[in-house]
Each structure stands twice: as C-alpha cells, then as structure tokens.
Amino acid sequence: MNQANRWMSLMSESEAFTIEQHLFYQKVQELNASLEQQVQERTAELERSLELAKVLKQVTDEIRSTLNSQTVLQTIVREVRKLLNTDRVVIYRFGPDWIGEVVVEEVLTPWDSILGKTYHDTCFPEEHAQQYLQGRIRAIDHVALSELAPCHKTLLHTMQVQANLVVPIRMHDTLWGLLIAHECRAPRRWQTFETDLLQQLADQAAIAIQQAELYEQSCVAAATAKAHAQQLEQTAQELAQTLQDLQQAQSQLVQTEKMSSLGQLVAGVAHEINNPVNFIYGNLTYAASYAKDLLEVVAAYQAQCPEPNAQTQAILETVDLEFVAADFPKILASMKVGADRIRQIVRSLQSFSRYDQLEKRSIDIHEGIDHTLLILQHRLKEQSDRPAIQVVKDYGDLPAIECYGGQLNQVFMNLISNAIDALEERDSQRTLAEMKLKPSQITIQTHWQPSETDTPYAVIRIEDNGTGMTDEVKTRLFDPFFTTKPVGKGTGLGLSISYQIVVEKHQGRLKCYSQLGYGTVFEIEIPAT
C-alpha cells in the first residue's frame, strides 16, 4: 500500500515536471518569436532608415550639384514614390489667394497626370494654411470615410485619390507649398516612418528652392549689372566711333573741298593756257611756210644779183644767211614740239581736274595713269642729288571701266607720290654709286581678272623697290591722320581717302603687300559694272 502511494506520488511529480517543462518551452518559443519579430521590425526600421539616408544623400548631392530647383524637386518626388511604393507624388505650390498649381509630379500608369493643373480649393481656409505653417501633417487613410469637407472630397475624387499624405514645404516664415503622396488603388494606412520621410524631404525641398531663388536673384543682379556695363561700354564705343566719324568726315570734307578748289583752279589755268598755246601751235605751221617762202625769195635774188651793192653786202656780212637758212626751220620744228608738249600737259591737267563728276563714266584706266605720270614727271626726272626714277609700265588689255575718273586719278596720284617719297627717302641715305648700281624704280602693271561666278574686275599694281614698311605701320596704313612722314610734309589723309574711294565709292579692294627691306606693292581692284 505504501509502495503504491509512493508510486502514485512519483507519477504526480513527473507529470508536474513535464507540464512545467512544456510551459517553459512555450515561453521560450514565445520569447523567440517576440525577439524575432523585434529583430525583423528593427531590421525593417534599419532598412527604412538606410533607404531614407540614401534618398536624403541623393537629394543633398543633387542640391549641391545643381542650383536648378526643378531638377531637385523632380528627384524628390521620384524617390519618394519609389520609397513609399505609392501611385502618385506631387509638389503643389501656392499662389495668391491660395490658388495653387502642381509644379512637379511622378505618377504611375494608369493614373491620370495632374501636372500643371491649377486648383482653387474653396475648402482650404486661411487657418488651414496657418496650421500647415506651424508644422501640421495630414494623413488620410481613407478619403471616403474621412471627416473632410464634401468639396475637399470631391476635389480628391477628381484626382482619383483614395488616400493621401500631406506635409508642408515652409520657407521664409511662409507656406511655399505641399509635398503630397497619393494612393489611387485603394485606401492605405500611413506609417510613422513614412510621415517622417516625407517631412524630411519637404525640408530638403525648401532648402533647394531657397538656394535656387538666391542663385536666380544673384544671376538677375549679375545680368543687370553686366547689361548696364555693356550698355555703358557700348555707349562709350558709339561716342568714340561718332567722334572718329566726325573727325574723319571733317577731314574728308576739308580735303574734298581743297581738291575741288584745286581742281577748279587747275582747270581754269589749263583753260587759260590752252588758248594761247593753241594759237601758237596753230600758227607755227604758217610761220614755217612763210619762212620757207622768204628763204626761197632770198635765194632767187642771190641768183639774179650775184654782185650786191655795198649796203647789201654790209648787211650780208653782219647776218650769216646760210646759218639762218639752215637753223630757222629747226627752231620752228622745236617750237612745234614744245607747243605740242604744252598741249599734252594741259590736256592731262584738264583730265586730272575732273573732281566734280558726280556720275560714273566709262574711263580708260591707262589714260588716267599716263596723265598722272605726266603731271608727276618733274619729280621722276633726274635731280641734282639722284638719278631719274625709272617707271616701268606693263599694261594689260583692259576694257573701259565704269568709275569716277577724277577720284580714281586722285588714288593714282596718292599712291605714285607715296612711292616717289619712299624712294627719295631711301636715296637720301645712299651714295651715287649705290643709286646707279640699284636704281630706284616704280613698276605699274594692269590686267583684267575675268570670273565665271563673281563680277570681273580690273587690277592695277603699283610697286616700288624702296625700303618697305614694318607690320605695325601696315596695320595702321589706312587710318585717318596716320603718317610716318615729317611734320609739314604729310597729313595722313591720302591713303585713307584713297581707301574710301576704292572700297566705298567703287565697292573694290585696296591691298598693301610690304616687307621691310623689299619694297611695297599697292594693289587696286575695281569691279566692272
């Protein structure tokens, strides 16, 4: 009996131990499950924190890499939509009277886009704005079951929204806009970490917008300052150009008036000389004929009266009749050559002095060059301190050119005169032997340049074998008032006026090729019209 009781007692203790062991294992399993759940929750929280850190870093990097607020805001809505796995994320910006516009959007298909749409939410009074400005966050899990005003529900319904999460974007103590996540498929319960994520990104959006506005203001200020500086610089340049144009116009006016007066004077003198020269030249033929007749009469008297009386003999002894009879025709012929030379010079002066021609005429270029050379003949011939300057003419076959003949003659005069000046300056530093070894020379070449595509043109090259010029002089060659000649010898207007006559009046080209020590070439191109 005692043994049976003992056995029953042992059985009771064993069952109690088993029950306690089972309860212990159950508690352990529950603890493990709780720990596992905590670990999972903690892991999920860490993953969310990591994702949030990644998004924040990306947004921060975007802010640092660009000052374009649109780019940063687009990055925010894109990353928020992916991180929250929602249907649409937008940034809504307020305007006057709380009329706002969706400025940035990231939306999935098939939900409609609301980008750029303007909404005037009459259910959004000013006190709501003040609440958002103070940091209000609004999470709507189910729009249809929410306590929103009917007009607000209708607005969300038009946007296909069933749940939304709204956080403010605050800047400068004002409510700039809202960062909103839309759930369009079904209602959704928003988590705390999602709210925190949205708020932190809204703060980053505010920073990006502020930086972009400051940058835009600085750009506008810089652009305004730059535009003002450019305007001042342009005004200064225009004033300087106007002053230069006035000076140039004044110099051209003076020079034109001077050349016009000189042309009128030359034309008048040439006309006055031309009349007596023509009289002399025309009567020389009759004088030669009369002289011939008189000499024949004298010879006939000598044949009939071989023995003159004493008075006639005295006169014959005083006058060398044979010498007079031989030399008098020569004198008349020489006078005719001189008169002809004077007539040529007068014609050249008359041709060169045509400065008052206002219309283009068909001109023989070679005739104008020859007239110019004839007028400058006194400078080309031999001087007491130097030999004559040789002129080599290599004329091509040029047709008559429509141009302003008097003005073109002025160009020839300026260029040939400058060549003579350069050669005289070089010869003043050379010995007579050096001059004879390498004589001064001016070469004038002309040729016709035909063209199948462009306008053909006449080319006139005036070349001297002087000392040439430096690159610095060449760059300023056609500038008004620039000259390398001594004071009183040059005005610095000849080449400037020549350039304007060729380029502006004739639409041609005036080029200069020169190298120090190797002479200078001026090339004139006159287009045929």
Image (spheres, helix red, strand yellow):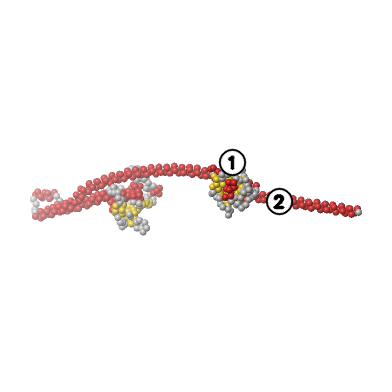
In the rendering, at what x and y percent does residue 468 appear?
37, 50
Q: In this view, does 255 lie to the left or right of 147?
A: left
Q: Is mark 1 on a helix, strand or loop?
A: helix
Camera-nearest residue between 320 and 375: 375
Taking 3 as reference, is 76 left or right?
left
The residue nearer to you, when weighing 215 against 195, is 195
| Earlier-in-chain disc, 2 versus 1 | 2
**From where the camera sits, is residue 504 visible?**
yes
Residue receiving disc 2:
37
Residue 64 position, x and y percent, is 57, 47
187 or 325, nearer to the observer: 187
Q: Residues within 10 Å of mark 1 (few under 14, many from 20)?
A: few
Say which of 418 and 411 sits in front. Answer: 411
Tag 1 residue: 127
Residue 207 visible in the shown view? no
Q: Is mark 2 on a helix, strand or loop?
A: helix
The residue lying at 49 percent from left, 44 percent from top is 223
Residue at left offset 59%, top offset 42%: 128
Kindly identify the amino acid type of the residue bearing the numbered disc 1.
Answer: Glu
Q: Which residue is drawn at 87% across and 52% down?
A: 9
Which image quarter is the C terminus in?
bottom left
Mark 2 residue type? Gln
Number of on-image labels: 2
Distance between the Cα atoms at labels 2 and 1?
43 Å
